[in-house]
Amino acid sequence: MALVEVRDVVKRYGPFEVLKGLSLEVEPHQVVCLIGPSGCGKSTLLRCINGLEPIQGGEIRLHGDRVSGPGVDVNALRRDVGIVFQSFNLFPHMTVLENVTLAPIRVRGVPKAEAEERAMTLLGRIGLDHKAREYPDRLSGGQQQRVAIVRALAMEPMVLLLDEITSALDPELVAEVLNIVRDLATDGMTMLLATHEMGFAREVASKICFLEGGVVHEEGPPERIFKEPASERTRAFLKRIIEAGRL
């Protein structure tokens, strides 16, 4: 059974239809990368899966259970589906340790000492345990994004959604964030990523989904999508990426 099932999902903002019956599946331990031009619906899809945006058609299932539409416990959904945004969204008035432990303590009811111990272990994995008592504005952008990833991991989610997590970073900081994602993929974390980092997507993805016009236009293993895409539209997109020196 797929861990995440998106079936014929429709998302509208007023008269503008962003997702037009989009369908995809994410298997356990799979890393699925969403690629495509700006405005194709990548970020919107992730927000719908996490329950941040209501959908107007279709359904989303997690482990076979419906997690979209009326009657869904959105808080329960977000305990199992973590999301990391491109703009970090750390609480500026809280230390790194407080940012990471807030949700496990408040939402999962984890005792403070246990939450802090796990947080320090996670921060140690990314080399930031020495920054635990610092506030976010004392960290670089790359460090803040790594903390944001750890904050999501502290909830021990079934699946992690990553929304263009390097787009707000200076180029020299991108690698340190991608290294964390690479390690998570190696550890078997189920992830769905929206990304413009084509070389990284080619390296880490189990499956590539090319979004165009609010649907999954083409999908498949990275070696096929990047070397022999079946669709002329996919070929045109990748040609521009290559010409821009991004693949």
Image (spheres, grey):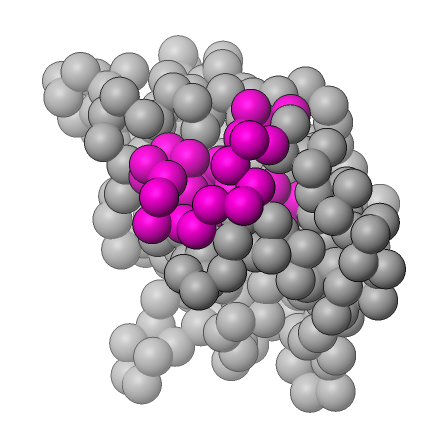
Q: Who's the residue at 17% across and 26% down the image?
A: 240
Q: In terms of secondary structure, what is the magenta stretch mainly?
A: helix
Point out the stretch of residues depicted in magenta. 125-153
Along the line of sight, the residue nearer the viewer: 150 or 83: 150
Q: Please state if 100 lies on the left or on the right of 213 as rendered.
A: right
Question: Residue at image x 68%, y 55%?
Answer: 101
| Residue 151 horizontal side relative to residue 89, left or right | right
x and y percent of residue 220 in the render?
Answer: 54, 28
Taking depth in this image into account, of 68 and 170 the one nearest to the observer is 170
Residue 209: x %, y % from top left:
48, 37
- Residue at screen point 84% across, 60% down: 110
Residue 161 in sight from this viewpoint: no
In this view, 122 is above or below 152: above
Q: Position of residue 63 (x, y in %)?
A: 82, 55
Taking the image as drawn, is residue 104 in sight?
yes
- Decide: is 99 above or below 150: below
Q: Is residue 197 above or below residue 50?
A: above
**Magenta-span inclusion, residue 6:** no
Image quadrant in which you'd find residue 59: bottom right
Percent x, y for residue 238?
27, 25
- Picture quarter containing residue 225? top left
**Residue ID at (34%, 72%):** 17
